[in-house]
Amino acid sequence: PIDIAYVNEQGIVTAVHTMKTEPPQRADESRGAYEVRLPRYPSGAKSRYAIELAAGEFARLGIAKGSEIKVDWQGVNTVARATRVAGSKR
């Protein structure tokens, strides 16, 4: 299990979820049926980032919807853009 926090461009958490381990696709289960039974973890609002930590860590850190995560988001955006351009096949 892991925690996932969705974060917008300003560093505000739009949603936090604990994602539990799900049973794998059964031999008698179609891919479509398998995907339908998996839970969804929506961002709740427009978000740019997803941060994953061990289950329970966001609660331990006091991070919830509406919390601000202070990171150099502009720097993160710059690195993300550079990585995307370097990996581009254009």
Image: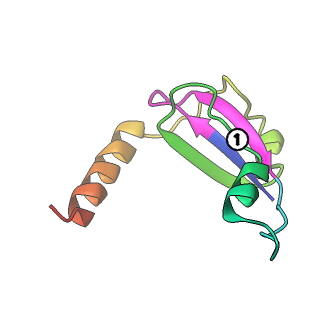
Seen at 85% across and 66% down, the residue is: 23
Magenta segment, principal secondary structure? Answer: strand
Depth check: give the residue in front, 21 or 79. 21
Seen at 39% across and 46% down, the residue is: 76
Residue 9 locus on image (x, y percent): 44, 31
Seen at 22% across and 63% down, the residue is: 86
Q: How many marks?
A: 1
Which image quadrant: the C terminus? bottom left
Dividing the picture into quadrants, the one containing residue 40 is: top right
Furthest toward the bottom, the residue is: 27
Give, as a single range, the part of the protein colored magenta. Answer: 6-19
Q: Is residue 15 magenta?
A: yes
Depth check: give the residue in front, 2 or 29. 29
Element at badge 1? loop
Residue 27 locus on image (x, y percent): 80, 77
- Amino acid type, label 1: Tyr
Is residue 42 shown above or below 83? above
Residue corresponding to mark 1:
41
Residue 89 locus on image (x, y percent): 20, 65
